[in-house]
C-alpha cells in the first residue's frame, strides 16, 4: 500500500522533479506534487510525495525531516487526510435569517398589490 507524505517549508523554487529525486533515494516514488497558487502558478511552499513502500516512506520521513533543501529546512511528515472545506462556516449569516419582512425588490418599498383595483396606500399582508 502506498504512503502519502507531506513536505512543508519548501523553497518556492523547488520543483516536483527535485522532490522526486530526493525521495527516490529511499524507495520508489509514485508521484511528487508541488502545490501551486491557482492564479499565479507560484508554489505555495509545500507539496506531497507518494511512495509505494510504507517502510521506505517512514525511513525517508525520519531522515529528511529538518534537513536543508535549497536553503530551507523542510518539514516532512505523514500526510493527514482532510476532507475539503472541513469546518468551513461563513463569518456572518449575511442577513440570511431575516425572513420576509414585507420588502419588495427595492428596499423600503412595501409589498403593495400591483393590481389597479387596489389603493396603493393600502398594506396587504
Image: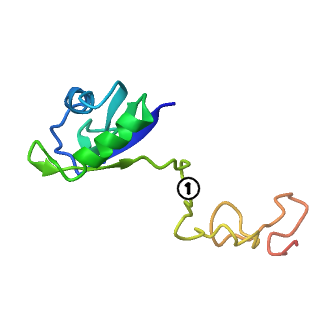
At 55% from the left edge and 60% from the top edge, which residue is drawn? 88
Q: Which residue lies furthest to the left in this view?
A: 71
Q: How crowded is mark 1: few (under 14 residues within 10 Å), some or many (20 or more)?
A: few
Q: Is residue 125 left or right of residue 81?
A: right
At 52% from the left edge and 50% from the top edge, which residue is drawn? 82
Q: Position of residue 45 (x, y in %)?
A: 24, 46
Q: Position of residue 5 (x, y in %)?
A: 38, 41
Q: How many labels does the image show?
A: 1
Provide the secondary structure element on which disc 1 rests: loop
In the rendered image, the quadrant that contains the C terminus is bottom right
The residue indicated by pointer 1 is: 86
Position of residue 42 relative to residue 51, above or below, is: below
Foreground of the two, 102 or 35: 35
Q: Position of residue 9 (x, y in %)?
A: 23, 51
Q: Is residue 16 left or right of residue 98?
A: left
Position of residue 72 relative to residue 24, above or below, is: below
At 42% from the left edge and 46% from the top edge, which residue is drawn? 79
Is residue 36 in view?
no
Q: In which quarter of the image is residue 55?
A: top left
Foreground of the two, 61 or 74: 61
Q: Is residue 46 left or right of residue 92?
A: left
Q: Which residue lies furthest to the right in this view?
A: 117
Q: Position of residue 35 (x, y in %)?
A: 33, 39
Amino acid at each position: 500500500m502506498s504512503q502519502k507524505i507531506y513536505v512543508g517549508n519548501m523553497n518556492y523554487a523547488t520543483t516536483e522533479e527535485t522532490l522526486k529525486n530526493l525521495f527516490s533515494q529511499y524507495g520508489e516514488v509514485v508521484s511528487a506534487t508541488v502545490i501551486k497558487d491557482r492564479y499565479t502558478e507560484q508554489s505555495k511552499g509545500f507539496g506531497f510525495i507518494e511512495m509505494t513502500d510504507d517502510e521506505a516512506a517512514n525511513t525517508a520521513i525520519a531522515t529528511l525531516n529538518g534537513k536543508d533543501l535549497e536553503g530551507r529546512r523542510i518539514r516532512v511528515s505523514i500526510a493527514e487526510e482532510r476532507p475539503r472545506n472541513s469546518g468551513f462556516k461563513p463569518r456572518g449569516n449575511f442577513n440570511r435569517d431575516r425572513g420576509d419582512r414585507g420588502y419588495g425588490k427595492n428596499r423600503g418599498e412595501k409589498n403593495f398589490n400591483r393590481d389597479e383595483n387596489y389603493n396603493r396606500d393600502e398594506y396587504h399582508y
